[in-house]
Amino acid sequence: MSEIDRILESCIECGLCVEECEFLKQTCDSPKDLARELGDSHPSENPRVPYSCNLCDLCERLCPSELNLGKACLEVRHHLASEGYCSLRSHQAVAEDREWSLSNFYLAMADPDLDGCDSVFFPGCTLSGYSPWLVVRAYEYLKAELPPTGIILACCGNPTYSLGQEEAFQIILREIQGSMERLGASQIIAACPECYHTLKYLEGLPVVSLYEVVAKQGLPETTPAGEAVFSLHDSCSTRYEQSLQESVRELVRQMGYRIEEMEYSRDMTRCCGMGGMAAYADPRLANKVTRKRAREAKHDILTYCASCREAFAMLGKPSTHVLDLIFNPDWEKERRPQPKTRDQRRENQALLKSQFAAGLKGG
């Protein structure tokens, strides 16, 4: 049974999901209204609606029947893609980024200091675009703690999957799978929560979080201690990843910082506004979601997702990435940087690739 049919059959119209979701507030009075709209008309008649959902799964967490409007919207996106519709004009940027990732950015490399590799570090395209320096430092740490460790620079394919483009998504997965086989690696260490979540679609390859690895192996000796208090934002892709969430909190505690939990956190966390590629369909709504989340933070926001970090930076909200706390002694000076433009992200990704291709000379 499709999720649309499940909603039409089982929704009791309690209003809990609509009350907490800006997308649903803007779109319908009840999930059944939206399900009828999605099911009764061809999605190409009003495609902006299914593409405006963040796919964050909070509605499922709130619903007494565990119904999920995001899954319903994703079903429609898959239907559009399967019939050859080109989605929205604004989604062309996603396709261009995918091509960039599979060509100019892509790199698969074994540990340059040792033969072969047991694990592969997968920093993801967003963290690489945010800070090549942090990627290099994290990789140097992994090489020292878990030798031999290789690296794959690529997009995990989540943007493509989120648009419902299953065929293109499978091409990306096959490319990553093939690189893992050629490198002889048996484990992926993902820095990005979205990558961690998405790469689990790879068959027979365990995926662990960088934060779980650091919590187990121990912080670098150079990590400074601090006393700041943060509002910790959990990426919505970690909603049901309790071990990952706790590893981040443990690292923050070990560094001496304090966390004041936000009202909506862990399995009840809210989206930063960037989830599900919704910002491409309705940037005004995405901005509203981001502002709502930022207002809930009483302190500087601490994230462990570079995309979330950049979303809050667009509002000028003081925010810091956990990897900055670990590897960047000057993180306090960079609490209010401007978010990276698309060109700046690509420049950073290209710089990172060139550094690795040169064997990390100059680090």
Image (cartoon, rainbow, N blue to C red):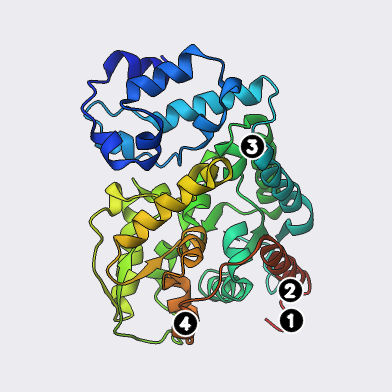
Closer to the chain start, of discs 3 and 1, is 3
Q: Nearer the viewer, residue 143 or 48?
A: 48
Q: Secondary structure at mark 2?
A: helix
Q: Marks 2 and 3, how far apart in space?
A: 28 Å
According to the picture, the residue beneath numbered tag 2 turns out to be 355
* For the residues bearing labels 3 and 4, Cβ distance under 8 angstroms: no
Q: Where residue 283 appears, x then y in whole percent? A: 53, 48
Which residue is denoted by mark 3 in the rendering?
169
Q: Which amino acid type corresponds to the residue marked 4 in the rendered image?
A: Trp
Mark 3: few/some/many CA within 10 Å (<14, 14-19, 20+): some
Q: Earlier in the sequence, mark 2 or mark 3?
A: 3
Residue in view at x 31 percent, y 25 percent: 30
Q: Are marks 1 and 2 in contact (CB under 8 Å)?
A: yes
Tell me the kind of residue under disc 1. Answer: Lys
| Mark linked to residue 309 | none
CA gap, disc 1 and disc 2: 7 Å
Q: Which is in the foreground here, disc 4 or disc 1?
A: 4
Where is mark 4, residue-wise? Answer: 331
Q: Earlier in the sequence, mark 3 or mark 4?
A: 3
Q: CA distance from mark 4 to mark 1?
A: 24 Å
| Residue 297 picture location, percent across and down | 30, 64
Examine the image and state in which quarter residue 302 appears.
Answer: bottom left
Instruction: State the mark number for residue 361.
Output: 1
